[in-house]
Amino acid sequence: MVAGALQQPRQALQRRLRQLKGSVPVPVAVAEPPQEGAVVDLQLPLPPARAPFLPMLPPRPLKVLMADVSLPVPLSAVWTGIFTNESQFLAAFHAARSDLDFVITPWTKSGPSLASRTLQYVSPLSNPLGPRLARNTEVLECIQLAATGFVLHTRCTTEGVPFSGNFANYLQWVGTDDGRGCSRLVVTGECRFHTQVWGPLRGKVESESIKGMALAYAQFSRMVQETFGGGSPGAGGSAGGLGMAGGPPAVGPQGGGVAMLGALPLSTPRTQLAALLGGAGSSGQGSANTATVLALVLVVLLLYRLSLGDVMAVQLLRRLTGQALTGTASAV
């Protein structure tokens, strides 16, 4: 009796196994990862169902705060409205900046990042002593993309201005969702030098570059607020993570966007030095700074030629010394 009861389930199992063995397996489609250079449609992932909300831990910000806006819309709306392949927001932003020949590529698979895209445009420059136009290339990389936040990195290089190969401008975009239908977008930036630059010129190039980026992204913040609503959490200038307070730092009247003059060697002509050094402060202060730096450059060049035994430089130094002594004696 017991043996017969055990035999029935065993026979049913054997019949089921024979049915599965004779059946045709159903093919399962497996999505292949995109190949290098393939166009990808980057979309913000949906949050997992019935999972607790875990905010994204923001990365360390760059040196200077460029934009910080809180928006009354979910993060997915911000991503779709600004960063997807179909969005026209970045094109409208550069048009408002009066940039020319704007071109943007779609997101493509590139290296270790999730995807990257390239922006190219020509920026008019207002400095009367410098170049009129600067050609910019920005490489935008998506480093992190999740339902609760994203991180983008930008590297901008410039062509058409003197010695622009000495530095590049960097931006970091961090978007976060608060889990209650609102979001926040923080942009920080900095100027990095890739070759050795003389101290006073290095500081001037960096400050002017930061001013230009701050002017551009102050306008970007206004456009974002006009598009999505919301406002800036506070006022300030230095970056401190997503807990930072403040909008863009105060900038001078001579900022010219992210495309600024590069570092200059000691052999730079006076007009190029004036174009770089005459933009900060009032006109009198700018002229004084320019004259001081020019004098320092000329002294360094003179000492360099003296070290090489330049006869003309020695004669010039004697003549200047004699004139200085004569002038002093006359004054006495």
Image (cartoon, grey):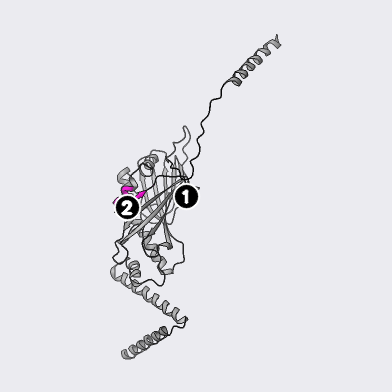
The disc placed on residue 279 is none
Q: Nearer the viewer, mark 2 or mark 1?
A: 2
Going 37% across and 87% down the picture, which residue do you hit?
Answer: 319
Residue 259 pos. (x, y %) = 36, 58
Q: Label 1, secondary structure: give it.
A: loop
CB within 8 Å, label 2 to label 1: no
Q: Is residue 244 visible?
A: no
Residue 113 pos. (x, y %) = 48, 47
Residue 309 pos. (x, y %) = 46, 83
Residue 275 pos. (x, y %) = 33, 67
Q: Name above or below for residue 47 compared with residue 203.
A: above
Q: Quadrant of residue 170?
A: bottom left
Going 35% across and 70% down the picture, which residue do you hit?
Answer: 273
Going 30% across and 50% down the picture, which residue do you hit?
Answer: 95
Pick the residue in front: 263 or 135: 135
Pick the residue in front: 111 or 297: 111
From this viewpoint, which residue is outermost toward the top? 1
Q: Label 2, secondary structure: give it.
A: strand
The N terminus lies in quadrant? top right
The disc placed on residue 101 is 2
Residue underneath mark 1: 59
User: Label 2 sits on what residue type?
Assistant: Asp
Question: Magenta part of the protein: which range?
Answer: 91-105
Pick the residue in front: 182 or 115: 115
User: Label 1 sits on what residue type?
Assistant: Pro
